[in-house]
Image (cartoon, helix red, strand yellow):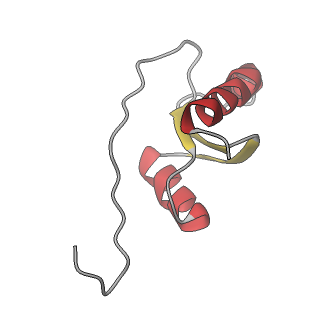
Amino acid sequence: MEDARSRFRREQAVFDQRRAAWIREGHAGRWAVIHADEVFGIFETSHLAWVEAIDHYQVPGFMVRRITEKDEPVIVSHVCFHAQGTAS
């Protein structure tokens, strides 16, 4: 099984490879969701990107990144999931 650091590098490589095309296509300022080598989608807001990615993948393990011409600081937060009906 691939570790998180290796998967992050792969997802970052996909983002870097696609960034210029996304900018040319008018996606600057939108949010990309990438899982492994797959671009799941481009979304108008970070909230929508997260909601759609979580709905599709069920668990964390994907990259959500704002599409910009230059790198911006990446803010990473912890996201916790609880199954319905379970005690936390």
Q: Residue at x 36, y 30 (%)?
A: 75
Eyeballing the image, is 10 above or below 78? above
Eyeballing the image, is 87 above or below 65? below
What x and y, as percent, mark residue 83?
Answer: 38, 77
Q: Nearer the viewer, residue 1 or 47?
A: 1
Is residue 78 shown left or right of residue 21?
Answer: left
Q: Residue at x 73, y 30 (%)?
A: 14
Name, please, the residue furthest toward the left: 88
For residue 30, say whether it is visible. Answer: no
Q: Nearer the viewer, residue 69 or 25?
A: 69
Q: Nearer the viewer, residue 17 or 67?
A: 17
Q: Nearer the viewer, residue 39 or 11?
A: 11
What quarter of the picture does the C terminus occupy? Answer: bottom left
Number of marks: 0
Eyeballing the image, is 49 above or below 70? below
What x and y, as percent, mark residue 59?
Answer: 51, 60
Q: Residue at x 75, y 30 (%)?
A: 25
Q: Quadrant of residue 85?
A: bottom left
What x and y, as percent, mark residue 18?
Answer: 75, 27
For residue 9, say whether it is visible. Answer: yes
Name, please, the residue furthest toward the top: 70
Q: Quadrant of residue 15?
A: top right
Q: Residue at x 45, y 17 (%)?
A: 72
